[in-house]
Image (cartoon, helix red, strand yellow):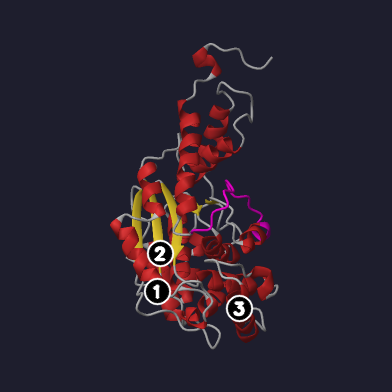
Amino acid sequence: MRQPIARFSEILALLPELPGPDLESATKAALREGQLTKPAGALGRLEEISAWMSTWQAAHPPRLNRPRVAVFAANHGIAARGVSAFPASVTQQMVQNFVSGGAAVNQLCTAFDAELRVYEMALERPTADFAVGPAMDEEECARAIAYGMMAVEPGIDLLCLGEMGIANTTSASALCVGLFGGTAADWVGPGTGVAGSALARKIEAVDVAAKLHFSEKRAPLDVLARVGGFELAAIVGAILAARLARVPVLLDGFACTVAGAVVRALDPRGLDHCQVAHLSAEPGHRRLLEKLGRTALFDFGMRLGEASGAALAIAVVRAAVACHTGMATFADAGVSGKA
């Protein structure tokens, strides 16, 4: 049994254990796809998604019987600087809304028959203000990562990740500066709808943090601890645990994808079992996906967070799996193949 994780060295020790793609399952998926009653490539990205599911589940045919939506909620000390349109108390209020079934993600989970789990992370104790010092120390960050790993339980065949935390797009923007460079203005967007002086405060907060923390190159987990949040660290842990358990992952919008970028910075192949569900309306998300070389599954102009885009993408994955497993082959249907 592993001891509780409390140091970055223990997180880094997991990286050599991350399994790669299961090539046998990938080959079986490709062979079946080529026999289905349609022109090759006619289903576009649906074909890629079904192959991705098989490859990372290490199973053919792919399955989608038990998707889980995991929403991590935490508060940020930087919120006290007025960088959001809402007070930090809204985090707790929205968690209660999730529990009561009143949020958008509740309706989406019901529509697509997905489990919803909400992980509340010490909302009464926000991270420190990263404009004056590190948001977390090493132990706090490592324990948050370990907490996120608990979202992956036996029997899950798809994990959808999301977050709730007032001011977390400020944290996400600062993470992008630390991981990819650029200025605060390159990454900061309206988040919950800030404009004018509030947006200026948000940019200033990230600019101050960048000068304080990133005057020199830092390791990915150090970047996370300095300007990240408990919920973003937990998403890092969930991504790693899903890889270890061979569970494919759907990432939600900007903040969630930034957490994924930390994993990619730790291991260039560390996000291969993940798809980005949607392109957020938050402008930094498009820039981030370009840096990661990723294309989201859809762009509906969403910027809600709370795993709403990832939950919606379950429908796309269901469609991909259904077509791959349910369609007849040319031989089954008595249809002539390509001449």
Q: In the displayed structure, does residue 107 sit left or right of residue 227?
A: left
Locate the C terminus and report the quarter of the image it occupies: top right
Give the residue type at disc 1: Arg
Q: Nearer the viewer, residue 194 or 259?
A: 194
Circle 1 SS class: helix
Locate the N terminus and report the quarter of the image it occupies: bottom left
Quarter holding residue 307:
bottom left
Q: In the displayed structure, does residue 13 sit left or right of residue 152?
A: right
Give the residue type at disc 3: Ser
Q: Label 2, on which residue? A: 72
* Residue 309 is a magenta residue: no
* Residue 291 is a magenta residue: yes
Q: In the displayed structure, does residue 224 sit left or right of residue 4?
A: right
Residue furthest to the front in view is 196
Quarter holding residue 96:
bottom left
Give the alpha-carbon distance from disc 3 to disc 1, as whole Å.
Answer: 36 Å
Instruction: Give the image location of residue 36, x and y in percent.
Output: 55, 23
Circle 3 SS class: helix
Q: Label 3, on which residue? A: 197
Q: Label 1, on which residue? A: 143
Q: Which of label 3 and label 1 is nearer to you?
A: 3
Give the residue type at disc 2: Phe
Q: Which residues are magenta?
A: 290-304
* Structural crowding at the residue carrying mark 2, measured as other residues with C-alpha within 10 Å and reported as few (<14), some (14–19) or many (≥20): many
